[in-house]
Image: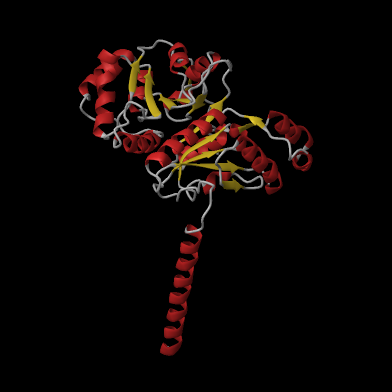
């Protein structure tokens, strides 16, 4: 028995050695194509195929004629590149940041890694690959789940942010503890975006921070909210669903700062909040400080509409938890993403949405 055990251990050790040698061989292969970074070092952005590309026409075929006709159509048109979708400018901006990082740190793997995360069938993959190559996008990792929800794979891909047009999947992701948002097409396509700098704008409460303060504002009114924020000014807010994504952006920003490139950093972050600065702004800024995070621009609007200001910022993506602000941003040409989290989901334009009565029958 002991001899058998020793043989098994020797075999296991040999297999581990062979596996390590295979990994080393693969890692040393020469290629002109930029290699995707290892997931443990990268900032991984998972995008659905319907956010990266405009697949409205294809989606209509799926809804009206079924999956078989949808797949057949995609195969018949696989040499035709898909149209650009709402997340396309963001992905291009991520690639711009990567190019700058590779120039400063040729061997670093702290980069953005873009993963195509889709419930499309593998047969559709050829058209997706052709479209990605047509536009020159650097997307090497795919997850195609053949009609099954891809949410279960997000953690395995070590996802830092998941973007989809499917609000249900986004909610599932947030419930799994993953930063996620539902993207919406902007109404005004003339809003030109920067091609040299990634710009990301965040709402505060229920996005970067928890909704603890917003609950007080909604349930007890603004005066109670202001009193509460003043009382707890030095107590950091709990983190919200996108705090970790801001943290990941900050990690990459600091790589530019270390090379004395703060003023030319290709990542810029914005806090765009309905809070008033004098009445409730200090707690927000002190919370960010306690987390060791910076925000490049903090814009306190004291309840004023966000759309006009976002029109000036021109972010590649703006995150907010309330659809009222999303709609206002969209109308003025801002690419907006809804974060379905917190008490704000129970309100529409400041009014409580009637909840269905609970069935008390047994």
Residue 78 appears in which quarter of the rendering?
top right
Residue 83 appears in which quarter of the rendering?
top right
Q: Relative to residue 348, is residue 133 depicted above or below?
A: below
- The C terminus: image quadrant: top right
Any part of residue 87 in sight: no
Q: Relative to residue 45, is residue 300 depicted above or below?
A: above
Residue 220 as seen in the image, left or right of residue 33: left
The location of residue 151, given as percent across then percent down, is 54, 44
The location of residue 233, given as percent across then percent down, is 22, 24
Residue appearing at x 40%, y 30% in the figure = 267
Residue appearing at x 44%, y 14% in the figure = 312
Residue 188 as seen in the image, left or right of residue 291: right
Residue 121 as seen in the image, left or right of residue 345: right
Residue appearing at x 58%, y 46% in the figure = 142
The location of residue 215, given as percent across then percent down, is 36, 24
Q: Nearer the viewer, residue 221 or 47?
A: 47
Q: Relative to residue 157, is residue 237 depicted above or below?
A: above
- The N terminus: image quadrant: bottom left
Any part of residue 212 in sight: yes
Q: Nearer the viewer, residue 140 or 211?
A: 140
The location of residue 200, given as percent across then percent down, is 43, 27
Q: Coloured how?
A: secondary structure
């Amino acid at each position: 028995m002991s001899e058998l055990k020793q043989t098994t251990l020797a075999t296991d050790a040999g297999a581990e050695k062979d596996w390590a040698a295979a990994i080393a061989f693969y890692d040393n292969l020469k290629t002109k194509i930029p290699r995707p970074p290892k997931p443990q070092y990268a900032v991984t952005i998972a995008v659905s195929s319907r956010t990266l590309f405009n697949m409205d026409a294809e989606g209509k075929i799926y809804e009206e004629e079924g999956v078989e006709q949808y797949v057949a159509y995609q195969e018949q048109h696989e040499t035709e590149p898909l149209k650009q979708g709402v997340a396309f400018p963001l992905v291009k901006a991520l690639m711009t940041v990567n190019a700058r990082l590779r120039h400063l740190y040729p061997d670093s793997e702290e980069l953005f890694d873009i993963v195509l995360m889709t419930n499309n069938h593998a047969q559709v993959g050829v058209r997706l690959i052709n479209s990605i190559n047509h536009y020159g996008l650097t997307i090497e990792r795919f997850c195609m789940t053949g009609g099954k929800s891809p949410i279960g794979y997000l953690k395995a891909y070590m996802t830092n942010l998941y973007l989809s047009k499917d609000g249900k999947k986004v909610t599932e992701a947030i419930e799994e503890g993953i930063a996620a948002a539902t993207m919406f097409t902007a109404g005004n396509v003339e809003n030109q975006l920067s091609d040299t700098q990634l710009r990301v704008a965040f709402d505060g409460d229920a996005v970067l921070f928890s909704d603890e303060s917003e609950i007080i504002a909604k349930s007890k009114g603004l005066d109670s909210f202001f009193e509460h924020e003043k009382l707890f000014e030095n107590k950091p807010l709990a983190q919200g669903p996108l705090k970790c994504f801001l943290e990941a952006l900050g990690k990459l920003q600091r790589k530019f700062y270390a090379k004395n490139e703060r003023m030319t950093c290709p990542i810029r972050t914005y806090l765009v909040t309905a809070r008033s600065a004098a009445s409730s702004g200090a707690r927000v800024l002190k919370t960010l400080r306690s987390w060791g995070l910076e925000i490049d621009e903090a814009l306190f609007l004291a309840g004023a509409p966000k759309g006009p200001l976002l029109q000036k910022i021109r972010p590649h993506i703006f995150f907010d938890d309330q659809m009222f602000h999303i709609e206002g941003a969209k109308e003025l040409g801002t690419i907006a993403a809804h974060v379905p989290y917190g008490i704000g989901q129970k309100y529409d334009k400041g009014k409580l949405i009637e909840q269905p009565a609970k069935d008390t029958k047994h």
